[in-house]
Every structure is written in structure tokens, then in C-alpha cells.
Amino acid sequence: MRIVMLGPPGAGKGTLAKFLVKKLNAPHVSTGDLFREAIKKQTPLGVTAKECIDRGELVPDDLTVKMVEERLERSDCQEAFILDGFPRTINQAEILDRILEEHHMPLDRVVEVKASNEMIIKRLVDRRVCSNCGHIYHLVNKPPKVAGICDDCGKDLMHRHDDREDVIRNRLEVYHEKTDPLEVYYGDKGILIEVDGEASIREYLEETAEKLNIPVSDEDFQ
Ligand code: AMP
């Protein structure tokens, strides 16, 4: 299944992506992760992307589209993918349509995770991410056993620069202005499903599975 995930930062797309990757055996293509990898490696793309990301702004389309197209052309994406963070604008959605059409890879579903700004700000300011394995923690709801250290790999947890309140507010403003219109864009194509990102993790994963006709059992939530 070829899936695009929509939803503001912090709505729970990361958790949903992990679940879908496992259930559908599909690669997770996250533009945010691809940019962060480029920043770590200090490539020319990484240097430009960092300036935009640190301000909570979008990276220019030409750079983003090239990166996504190269990733989708790889063999693991031919049958299925979970695309996360792209498209973020109508222009990017139209470009994606063109790329997928050229490669005969039609989209099956767009999953939109819905959550309010207030819920998101509460989640993100206390979010901590392992600098090594990417495991996600929350200082109140899911704290690590030892403060600042990842339970899984023992490496340091970090507070993403763009998870600070002023940057989050800017990211949300950019999201609502530029990405909200995609709800209508994909709704009109008849491939949009909406899920409640404010429900408990299990509830919203179950809701998504049901709407995508993916069978689940208790084991999926342990
Ligand atoms: P994310 O992890 O998806 O929240 O992405 C982190 C940051 O990467 C965003 O705030 C943007 O600056 C940049 N970014 C990710 N995806 C895109 C995109 N499709 N277009 C432009 N910039 C993007």
C-alpha cells in the first residue's frame, strides 16, 4: 500500500508510521528524518535545510522535491511506502502526483492525523528524542528510566531545537497556512481518511487500521 501521512508536527505521525511500517512491511520515508540525516552529515543540502528548520520554516521546494524523488526511486519503495512530511503544500502535492504517475505508482490512501494546537504544544515542549536510535520519550507521559538517557541504547536524549515553544508555534502556523488545503485536495480525490490523534495511542492506531482494512490483534499493541 502507498500511503501519505498528513498532520501537524506532534500529532502522532511518528507512532503511526512505526505501526504501519511493521504491519505493511513498507519503508518509512520521512522528509524531516532525511533532512536531519543530511544535517548530521553536513552535506550542502543539510547546511541549507538547517537554516530553514531552525526557524520552523519550510525548506525550498526544489531541494525537497529532488530529495524525495531520489528516495522514492529506490527499489524498496516500488510496491509500498509510508510518506511522512511530504507533501506539505499544494504545489508539492501536484509535483508528487506527477512523480508517481511517471513511475506508475498510484497513491492508495492519505491518512490525516488530527490534533489541536494546544495538545500539540503540550506534547512537543516535553518531547525528548534519543540522539542515537530516535526513540521518543515524553517527560511527563513516558519518561526514560534514567533522566536524559535512552532506555533502549543508553545514549543521550535531546530536545530538538524545533521543539521549543516559539518554533513550534511557527511550525503550526506554517502547517495551517500551507498544509491544511491538502485535506480538500485529497478529499476530492476520494482517498483521504481522518483519524483522531488526541485519542489514546491504541485507540487511534486501531481506528487507522480499521479504516485501512488492516487486521490487528492484541499483540500489535504490546
Ligand atoms: P518534520 O520532522 O516532518 O516536522 O520536519 C522538520 C522540518 O523539516 C520542517 O519543519 C521543515 O523545516 C522541514 N521539512 C520537512 N518536510 C518538508 C517538506 N515537505 N517541505 C519543506 N520542508 C520540509
Image (cartoon, helix red, strand yellow):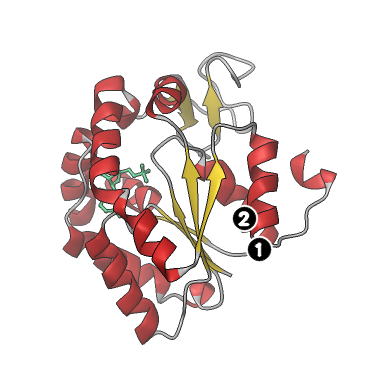
Q: Does label 1 point to a residue whose CB lies under 8 Å from ligand 1?
A: no
Image: 145 above or below 9: above
State the mark number for residue 222: none
Count of numbered badges drawn on the protein: 2
Residue at point 40%, 84% (across, down) = 103
Tag 1: Cα neighbours inside 10 Å, few (<14), some, or many (≥20)?
some
Q: Position of residue 134 (x, y in %)?
A: 50, 39
Is 131 in front, or is 213?
213
Image: 179 above or below 64: above
Q: Position of residue 63 (x, y in %)?
A: 20, 61
State the mark number for residue 20: 2
State the mark number for residue 24: 1
**Secondary structure of the residue carrying numbered label 1:** helix
Q: Is residue 184 left or right of residue 218?
A: left
Q: Quadrant of the N terminus?
A: bottom right
Q: Position of residue 210 (x, y in %)?
A: 70, 55
Q: Position of residue 97 (x, y in %)?
A: 34, 74
